[in-house]
Amino acid sequence: MQVDNIIMTIFICDLILNFFTLREAPDGTVPRSRIYIAKVYCTSLWLPLDFIATFPWDKVSKLLTYQAAVDEECPYKIGG
């Protein structure tokens, strides 16, 4: 579990740092505008990939599994 947290932290840092990494414009200049950098990153393929990599899928899965187990054990279901 400790290694998972370290790897997750690295991916989160990568996601955040990409909003500050300078990108070369099509005309060859390197704009320093944070808005430009954010627009380029948000419209690239890297943001969805970084988001998928940093999303806590295991924690959400555990939460949903726990909720399903609670729902099955509950004798007082509303609407069912």
Image: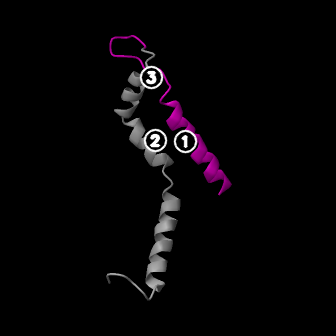
Q: Give the structural element (helix, strand or loop) at label 2.
A: helix
Question: In the figure, residue 11 lies in which quadrant?
Answer: top right
Disc 3 designates what residue?
A: 34
Can you identify the residue that label 2 sits on? 50
The span from disc 3 to disc 2 (Cα, nearest Å) is 19 Å
Query: Label 2 vs label 1: CA separation?
Result: 7 Å
- If the image is split into quadrants, where does the C terminus sit? bottom left
Nearer-the-camera pick, 27 or 35:
35
The crowd level at tag 1 (other Cα within 10 Å; few <14, some 14-19, many 20+) is some
Q: Going 39% across and 10% down the picture, which residue do you hit?
A: 29
- The part of the chain drawn in magenta is 1-30
Q: Amino acid at mark 2?
A: Asp
Amino acid residing under circle 1? Phe
> What coloring was used for the rendering?
one colour
Check if mark 2's residue and mark 1's residue have beta carbons within 8 Å: yes
Please state which of the two labelled residues, at mark 1 or mark 3, is closer to the viewer: 3
Against 68, residue 24 (above or below) is above
Label 3 sits on what residue type? Arg
Question: Where the N terminus falls, by quadrant?
Answer: bottom right
